[in-house]
Amino acid sequence: MADPRGRVALVTGASSGIGAATARAFAGAGLRVALCARRKDRLEQLAAELSTQGAEATAHAVDVTDAVAVRAMVDEVAARWGRLDVLVNNAGRGFSAPLEQTTAEELRALMELNVVAVLGATQAALPIMRRQGSGHIINVSSVVGRRAVPYRAAYSATKFALGALSEALRVELTGTGIALTLVYPIRTAETEFHEAEVQKVPWRPMGPVQSAERVARAILSCVRRPRPEVYPYWPVRILAVMSVIAPGLVDRGMRRVL
C-alpha cells in the first residue's frame, strides 16, 4: 500500500501511548481512523483533535475482551466506510512479578487481554479483508516477546504467544492479499501503560527507551511497505539472534543488571 490515503484503519488501545501516536500518524498520512479503547472521553478528545486537522476519525468505547462488542464495532467501521484495510492490535497491559508469586488467575486475565482479544479482533476483521482481497493485520508485541526478562515472565509469555499465533496466521494467509506484521518495540517513554501495570515488585526498567511516536512512524512505514516483522529499535534484532545462539550469554548479561 504505497499510498495509504483514503484507506481505513482500526487501532485498538488508541487512547494513549503507541495507539494514540499511531492514530495521529495514520491521520497525518490521509488514512481514515477508527479509534478503540475503553476510555470514551480520551477517544472523543483524540477524534476531535484529528478532525480539526482535516482527518476522518471515529471513537468506539469498547472493551476488546468483549468479543461480541468487538465484532459489532468492526462491522460498524466497515459499514461506515465501505471497507477495512488495516487493523492494529495494540491494546494490552503489562505485569511485573516474580513467577513464583504469579497466580493462575492473573496469568489467565493477562492472556485474555494480550492474546485472546487479539484473536477476537482479527477473526472479526478477516472476513471483511478476504472479501476485499486485501488488508493488513498489525500486531504490537514487545522486545520481551523475543527474549523473556526476569520478573516479567507472565507478560513475556503473552507476547511469545502473540508471536506464535501471528507467525502461523501469516503463512495461512498466503495468496489472500492480506499481510500480517509483528512489531517489536522496546519500552516507551509514555507512562500510562506502566502506571496501569500490575506490579508486585518495584519497577526497574532495563535498557533504552524510545518514544511512542517513533514506534508509530515504524508502523506507518510498514503499512506503506508491508513486511513480516518491524523493529523500531534495531538492536532488538541482535538480541533475538543472540537469545537463540547464545542464551547463556544473554542470561549472564541480564543477571548483571538485576
Image (cartoon, grey):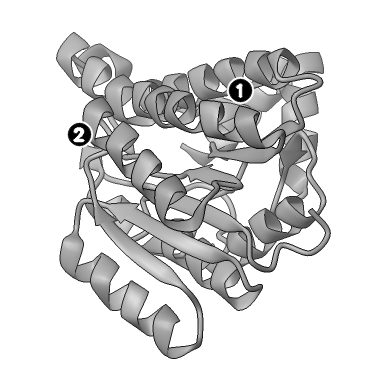
Residue 116 against residue 140 in the figure, above or below: above
Tell me if I can see residue 66 in this picture.
Answer: no
* Image disc number at residue 229: none
Residue 171 in percent (x, y) is at 74, 16
**Looking at the image, residue 64 lies above or below residue 154:** below
Instruction: Give the residue at mark 1.
Output: 166
Q: Residue at x 52, y 40 (%)?
A: 257
Label 2 packing within 10 angstroms: few (<14), some (14-19), many (20+): few
| Residue hosting label 2 | 200
Q: Residue 212, image x and y in percent?
A: 52, 64
- Image-based side of 240 in relation to 10, left or right: right
Tell me the residue at 45%/45% (across/down). 90
Q: Is residue 157 above or below residue 96?
A: above
Three-letter amino acid code of the residue under disc 1: Ser
Identity of the residue drawn at 59% across and 66% down = 31
Q: Tell me if I can see residue 223 in this picture.
A: yes
Q: Is residue 66 left or right of residue 86?
A: left
Quarter of the image for residue 218 reads bottom right
Residue drawn at (26%, 17%) of the image: 107
Dot 2 and dot 1 residues touching (CB under 8 Å): no
Q: Amino acid at mark 2?
A: Lys
